[in-house]
Image (cartoon, rainbow, N blue to C red):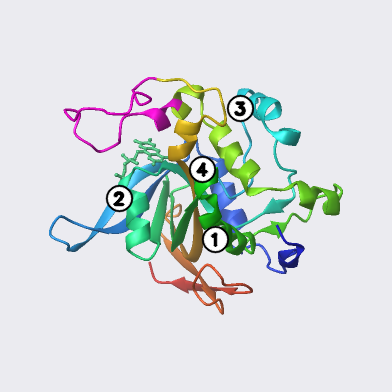
Amino acid sequence: MSLRAFPLSQTRAPWRDLISSHLEKQKEYDFTVATVGYDAKQRIVPRVRTCGFRGFFPELKLHPSGQKDLDQQVEDGGNPPLFESDLLSFTSDIRMEKLRQLDSTGNSIEAMFWLKEVMVQWRIKGQAYYIGSPAAESGKESDLQAQLFKALRRKDDYHGDEKADFKKWTWDKAITKYFANHSPAMRGSFRNPPPGQPRTQQLSNPDLSLGQKVSDLHDPVARGNFRLVLILPEEVEQLDLSNGDDPRRRKWTLVGGDGDVERTGGQWQESELWP
Ligand SMILES: Cc1cc2nc3c(=O)[nH]c(=O)nc-3n(C[C@H](O)[C@H](O)[C@H](O)COP(=O)(O)O)c2cc1C
């Protein structure tokens, strides 16, 4: 990784601390993820599903057993905690429709949280990109990773040896940490028979079956299917229903960026809307 992209002058998005404080009050971190796709008649159609929100990349607090796996199987136990970003993350399987939909319809995505504990709905619109291809294909991803890297900021409160730790930071370690964040049974789901295909279909690959447990963080079959999806927010909207007499709707829009993954230096503009 080149030092040219480091460090970024971007500042933390103004909605970041607010949404994080709301999420901290939740028991579950599931969110609704919408993409655009084509139906069998080639008409453009919306598609939604529930996904597990995995926080803002690359910060992720592992369960002790996941951390133990990372410590044992990954150099230095993973990356130094040098960076933060406003990119929302979830994980998925390359064999699932949503990733094909991102590829075929310009990476458009909308994610939505209804946080009942605080009576607030958050909608995040933007673009999503997925990373984590196996090493043999990872060359194709290096340009994308270099662009995504521009969205990372050095954490204000980082007190380590920045120069040395920057050299230790790799995408592979970052992605492996998200795989380690899954239980062995969840990791095993990436060795399931092909999601969405008829159960009657004869399976030709003997590696694939339900109910497998994976402790190897570099299991080639599971990692071949596992992907980390990163959402680059462009518009964030909060609908606050906590005061029934005075519903509030606020929107933050990223302006000044060029709207694609290469953007740098955009500014968030806030406006209050009628609910
Ligand atoms: C509570 C819950 C959490 C889920 N988390 C994820 C997830 O993190 N990633 C994912 O790809 N699918 C997740 N799923 C499954 C998806 O909702 C969906 O069924 C699957 O991803 C196939 O969607 P697709 O064909 O539109 O790609 C979850 C489902 C539920 C009910």
Residue bearing the label numbered 4? 134
Q: Contact (CB < 8 A) between labels 3 and 4?
A: no
Image coordinates for residue 254, horizontal then vertical, percent = 53, 72
Q: Residue at x 63, y 59 (%)?
A: 149
| 3D distance between C-alphas at marks 3 and 4 | 21 Å
| 3D distance between C-alphas at marks 1 and 4 | 15 Å
In the rendered image, the vertical position of residue 196 relative to residue 17, given as above or below: above
Q: Residue at x 68, y 48 (%)?
A: 170
In primary-sequence order, the first of circles 1 and 4 is 4
**Crowding at mark 2 (Cα within 10 Å: few <14, some 14-19, many 20+):** some
> In this rendering, which labeled residue sits more in front, label 2 or label 1?
1
In the rendered image, the vertical position of residue 70 relative to residue 82, given as above or below: above
Residue bearing the label numbered 3? 66
Residue bearing the label numbered 1? 144
| 3D distance between C-alphas at marks 2 and 3 | 29 Å
| 3D distance between C-alphas at marks 4 and 2 | 27 Å
Image coordinates for residue 66, horizontal then vertical, percent = 61, 27
